[in-house]
Amino acid sequence: DPEIILAQVANTLKNHCSNDNSTTCIQLRAPSLDQMQYTQLAMKLYGICHEAGSQLIWNCPLDWYQIAFADGLHLSINNFNAAKLQHDTRPIPASQWLSMACHNLVELESVQVLADTVLVSPVKTTATHTGSIPLTWAGFKAICDQARIPCYALGGLDISDVEMAIQQGGQGVAGISCFISK
């Protein structure tokens, strides 16, 4: 429900944004919405995020992306493959963040040429991707060791996993349930 998402994001930003000059990024992942619903929600969220001093990253197919209402784009591996991107052509301006999904070393090599950062998953067992085999922290570290761009751990994590992600070579953690404020 877009109205619930708007309220949750506003509340989450209120609870998690700090005055320490770090930037909080909100990634809008709403796969059940169609293009029009997603775009309308993203445009509203863009205002909420900027008012709170945070950035909005769209997580959608490349052809849905609207530069004017986003600070960046995250491409899942399916959306990356569907876009049929050339391995040397960045799909969005260099002034905006581009993150991509990564589940193994082969995907890392494909995406890190274009992306600013990767979300490496699943590190642990997660309720949202029950059929996925977790990488474990050792698998996350193996990907981080080969990466030339920052890596964020994703999948079954909590805020308490930030230190472990950093110890394994990552920048931190990404997630929904560990950050969202109801």
Image (spheres, rainbow, N blue to C red):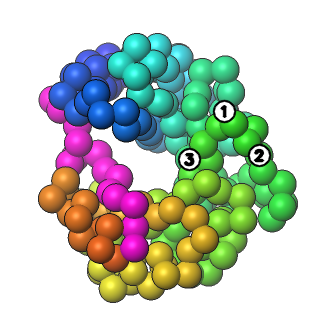
Quadrant showing the C terminus: top left
Q: List the residue tagged with mark 2.
A: 91
Q: Is residue 37 visible?
A: no
Residue at mark 1 to residue at mark 3: CA–CA distance: 10 Å
Local crowd size for mark 3, using a 10 Å CA cut-off: few (<14), some (14–19), many (≥20): many
Magenta span: helix, strand or loop, mainly? Answer: loop
User: What amino acid is found at the position of numbered circle 2 in the picture?
Assistant: Pro
Q: List the residue tagged with mark 3.
A: 74
Residue 33 on image: x %, y %: 48, 31
User: What amino acid is found at the position of numbered circle 1 in the picture?
Assistant: Tyr
Q: Residue at x 58, y 28 (%)?
A: 70
Res 22 → quadrant: top left
Q: Residue at x 22, y 46 (%)?
A: 177
Residue placed most toward the observer, 70 or 170: 170
Res 148 → quadrant: bottom right
User: What amino acid is found at the position of numbered circle 3 in the picture?
Assistant: His
Q: List the residue tagged with mark 1.
A: 65
Residue placed most toward the observer, 122 or 119: 119
Residue at mark 2 to residue at mark 1: CA–CA distance: 10 Å
Residue 67 on image: x %, y %: 68, 27
- Asked if the residue at tag 2 contacts the one at tag 3, i.e. Cβ–Cβ closer than 8 Å, the answer is no
The label nearer to you, 2 versus 1, is 2
What secondary structure is marked by label 3?
A: strand
Q: Residue at x 29, y 74 (%)?
A: 167
Residue 30 on image: x %, y %: 43, 37
Q: Residue at x 65, y 66 (%)?
A: 112
Q: Which residues are magenta?
A: 169-182
What secondary structure is marked by label 1?
A: loop
- Asked if the residue at tag 1 contacts the one at tag 2, i.e. Cβ–Cβ closer than 8 Å, the answer is no
